[in-house]
Structures are given as C-alpha cells and as structure tokens.
Amino acid sequence: AAPFDVESVRRDFPALHQSVNGHPLVWLDNAATTHKPQSVIDATSEFYGRHNSNIHRAAHTLAARSTDLFEGGRESVRRFLNAPSKDDIVFLRGTTEAINLVAASYGRANIGPGDEIIVSTIEHHANIVPWQLLAQATGATIRVIPVNDRGELIFEQYAALLSGRTKIVSVTHVANALGTVNPVREIIQLAHAYGVPVLVDAAQSSPHIPLDVQSLDADFLVFSGHKVFGPTGIGALYGKSHLLEAMPPWQGGGHMIEDVTFSKTVYKGAPEKFEAGTPDIAGAVGLGAAIEYLESIGLPAIAAYEHDLLEYAQAGLADVKGLRLIGTAREKASVMSFVIEGQENEAVAHHLDAHGIAVRSGHHCALPALRRFGVDQSVRASLAFYNTRADVDAFLRALHTLPRH
Ligand code: PMP
C-alpha cells in the first residue's frame, strides 16, 4: 500500500487527467520531464499576475516582493539539499548549465595539461561534453569508470583510476539511461582520500531519493527543476562555500557586480557572482513551490513507494516475449530501459502512444552507456510517485499486444 494517497496526489496534477489517442494518459516519461502540481502552476502564474518585477529589492514594493519570492525559492532549494547556507545555491537553467559552469569556472582555474577528470560510462552527455571541452582547452584527460553487465560501476576500477593526477570526479547519482543508483557516498569518500572534489549529477536522483549534501559531503551537486515537478528553465548548483568563493565568474553582466569601471570590476560574492543578468524569477518561485509540494509528501515515502512499483513493473517486463532489460543493477530508481527482439524501438514507442502511454525511444543523451550494452537506442519507461500499478498494467498490456512479425 502507498505510504501516501496516490489517488489524491494524482488529483494535484492536471496534465495527468487527459485522453491521448482515446485512452487515459499514462505518463511514463518522467526521466525526460515530470508533470507539475497545481501549486507550482499557481505559484508561477501568481508571480506573473501579481508580483512581477525585476529583483532590485530596494527599488519599490513589487521589487521587494519579487526579490523575497526569488530568495524564498533559493531557501527552499537549500532545505531540499540540506545545504549549510542559501549562499551555496546558484540558480541556473538546469543541470546542463550547472555542469558547464563548474567545468568552465572551477575547471579552467584548477585543471591543466596532464591532469585527469574522472567520469563514468553511464553519464548523460551533459556530464561528458563539458568536461571534453575543458580537456580540449587545457590538455587534461578524461578517464572513465567502467560498469559491469548489470550496469553497476566497478568500484575497484574507480579506485585504480584515482591518483595524484586526478583533479575532479564527476558522476551521476542515478543513471538516466539505465536507472543504476551509484554509490555516491563511497565515491566521494574515496575521492576525498586523494583530496579530489566530486560533482554529483542529481538530475535523476532528485525526484526519487532524499538528498543531503552535508551528509554526502558532496563538493558540487546539480539538478533540474523540471525533473522535480517544477518549471523548465530553472535548476540549481550547490557548491561548498570555499569552492564557490574561490571560483572566478563565468558570465559577466548585471546583478553580479559590486562596482564597475572601464578598468576594473569588483564582483559580488556567491551566489550572485554566478548569476549574471535577470534570472528566471518565476522559475525559481515555481521550483520553490515544487519543493514544498515534495516535502508535503516526503522523499522517503516517495522512494519506498517507487521501489515497490519498480519491482512490480520489472517483474511484469520479464514476461514480455523477447524483451531485454538494459540495466539490471541491484540498486535502481525509476528507469526501465529495454529493447524487444524483432521490434524497432520507435515502433514500440508509437504503439504505446497509440494506447495513451508516453515513453521515450532513442539514445536518451547517453550513447556511451547504451553502447556498453551493444545498442545505441532503447525504449525507456520511467516512473514517478504519481504512477500507479494500473499505469504499469496498462503499459504491460500494451507491450503484450505488440504486432509480431
Ligand atoms: N544529467 C542527467 C543524469 C539527466 O538525466 C539529464 C536530463 N535528461 C541531464 C543531466 C540534463 O538535464 P537538463 O537537460 O535539465 O539540463
């Protein structure tokens, strides 16, 4: 039984209540993006409808309100991650922009020729390409932690990659193409034994697993609002304060300065130093509302519920003829990636769509992860706490009626 009332949760998400191709919508594309509860929609539209101002606290009443709302969103993110201070939270467009910031700012300042950057085989392209750009610009090298046939990182091989040359480790918490939950706590502990900082890509873990940057001792942690039931266009970077303070700005402009002359600019401290220009104020307000919504249910309850639902769904998939699950880690969250013998992935996704069931087919921006398993595409179904056994049953039923040739 659910530790919360799933049916009442579902009523909070207007987009879930529609017909698609004559069937009730079953949304199993949560790893790509999640639907928004009414409270997030209301917070965002109320921002534009009533408060809307740029964030210069002192200018006038609406500016003060908008600034307070924006900073309230930042405080919600701080709580969500259990960061020590609101100043450790930088608002950005999302995970991609946050990793690019760290690679460009921390990376350019600290990584040089012959240095090494460690990532894993099962990263999203957003946690590969920014490091490649950095490596190309600096002469550093990327080293890759391999995975076993279940899609789990091989820890001894990670340990063997760490050395005095390692300058940063950047790994995903949950792999978006496979669902593997990585042992980020142990990964961080070992890196710290070498004095190496770790960036945790929490884009896929943040909707499913309680996060605590202090308990994990993460140096950087990044996530996207749209995957935690908040708006698109907003996300956050957490960084340890001593790291953020030492990092140079990466974009220049308004909001991030104390003083500018044509010979010199004095920057503000973190987080403003990294927030040049007018931010996504409504997005930050909506993200704050999404976090409050999640807190009202509780991430531990969500994790327990989804764990059961994933086991139920994976047991069902085992009965689908010719289906091969890609990513069978002992610790998984949300994601079921698969191919079916004799079926085109895209045709499977279209067949499901014809039954009102939304999944993704393609490479999921994780080509190296899929290639490790001999494919460069899969069908991916991914769960959230508003999914039910009835959703899973509809999905399995549709898979059993795939036209066979
Ligand atoms: N990392 C992971 C693990 C992801 O799943 C995603 C989103 N698919 C990203 C990074 C990129 O997130 P965004 O597109 O929101 O910047």
Image (cartoon, rainbow, N blue to C red):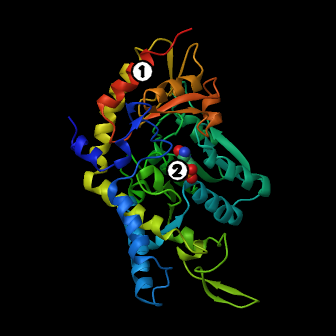
Q: Residue furthest top?
A: 405
Residue shown at the point (32%, 54%) measured from the top left: 294
Residue shown at the point (67%, 75%) measured from the top left: 252
Camera-nearest label, 2 or 1: 1
SS at circle 2: strand
- The reply to whether the residue tagged 2 has its Cβ within 8 angstroms of ligand 1 is yes
Where does residue 334 sit, x and y in percent of width and height? 41, 37
Pick the front one: 354 or 155:
354
Pick the front one: 44 or 228:
44
Earlier in the chain: of badge 2 and badge 1, it is 2
Which residue has dot 2 on it?
201
- Please, is residue 168 above or below residue 394 in the view? below
Quarter occupied by the N terminus: top left
Where does residue 241 sit, x and y in percent of width and height? 50, 70
- Please, is residue 97 above or below residue 87 in the view? above
SS at circle 1: helix
Q: Which mark is residue 29?
A: none
Instruction: State the image quarter where residue 72 is shown.
Output: bottom left
Residue kind at label 2, given as amino acid type: Asp
The alpha-carbon separation of the residues under discs 2 and 1 comes to 33 Å
- Asked whether residue 306 appears in the rendered view, the answer is yes
Q: Is residue 300 left or right of residue 188?
A: left
- Please, is residue 315 above or below residue 14 in the view? above
Quarter occupied by the C terminus: top right
Where does residue 230 sit, x and y in percent of width and height? 42, 56
Pick the front one: 158 or 208:
208
Which residue has dot 1 on it?
398
Where does residue 293 sit, x and y in percent of width and height? 31, 56
